[in-house]
Amino acid sequence: MTETIVSIIAGSESDKEVYEKTEEVLKEYKIPYELKIISAHRDPDKLDEYLKSCKSLVYIAIAGLSAALPGVIASKTEKPVIGVPVSAKMGGLDALLSIVQMPPKVPVACVGIDRGENAAYLAIRILNIYKK
């Protein structure tokens, strides 16, 4: 079995339209990934357990509304985290601002609202650094 390289974590099943875009690109480029639905608010213990056991090199965190998920993940790992804001409310601006306004030492890369595919492309570019 191939080792997972990218971990996609969505905060809710309702983010399906966005995480499917991410999956399509990773499949196209044959990047091993796994998808988990874990809310930073509703399932904090489950998220902690997953992050402690996960061997992925890059995280893609998909979240709407307060979009805490990418920042929470970044606060618990030294690995790259890419946040994807979802247009659940306010056109996604609430999620976008939550993701880009991380405090010092908690970096999260952020792609455009609902741009799951760009998160996958960015993850691939990050992974290409490891190949060199």
Image: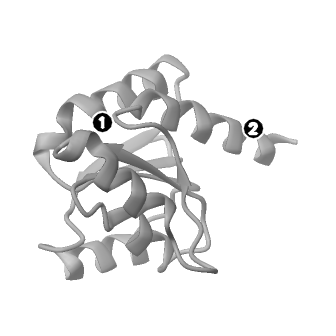
Q: Which of marks 1 and 2 is in front?
A: 1
Which residue occupies 11% across, 42% down? Answer: 14
Q: Measuring from the top left, give residue 78's x and y in whole percent.
A: 61, 73
The earlier-in-sequence mark between 1 and 2 is 1
Mark 1: few/some/many CA within 10 Å (<14, 14-19, 20+):
many
Q: Nearer the viewer, residue 34 or 59?
A: 59
Outermost residue on the top side: it is: 28
In which quadrant is the N terminus drawn?
top left
Q: Mark 1 points at which residue?
A: 19
Pick out the residue farthest to the right.
132
Label 2 environment density (alpha carbons within 10 Å; few <14, some 14–19, many ≥20): few
| Kind of residue at badge 1 | Tyr
- Name the residue at 61% across, 37% down: 122
Instruction: Tell which of 110 and 7 is nearer to you.
Output: 110
Visible in this render: residue 125? yes
The percent position of residue 117, horizontal first and vertical second, equals 45, 27
At a point 34% along the width and 34% down the height, the residue shown is 114
Q: Which colour scheme is used?
A: one colour
For marks 1 and 2, give the CA distance. 22 Å
**Left or right of 14 in this view: 85:** right
Q: List x then y, in percent, for residue 15.
A: 19, 41
Q: Nearer the viewer, residue 88 or 42?
A: 88
- How many marks on residues? 2
The label shown at residue 88 is none
For mark 2, give the secondary structure. Answer: helix
Residue type marked 2 = Asn
Can you identify the residue that label 2 sits on? Answer: 128
Mark 1, secondary structure of its residue: helix
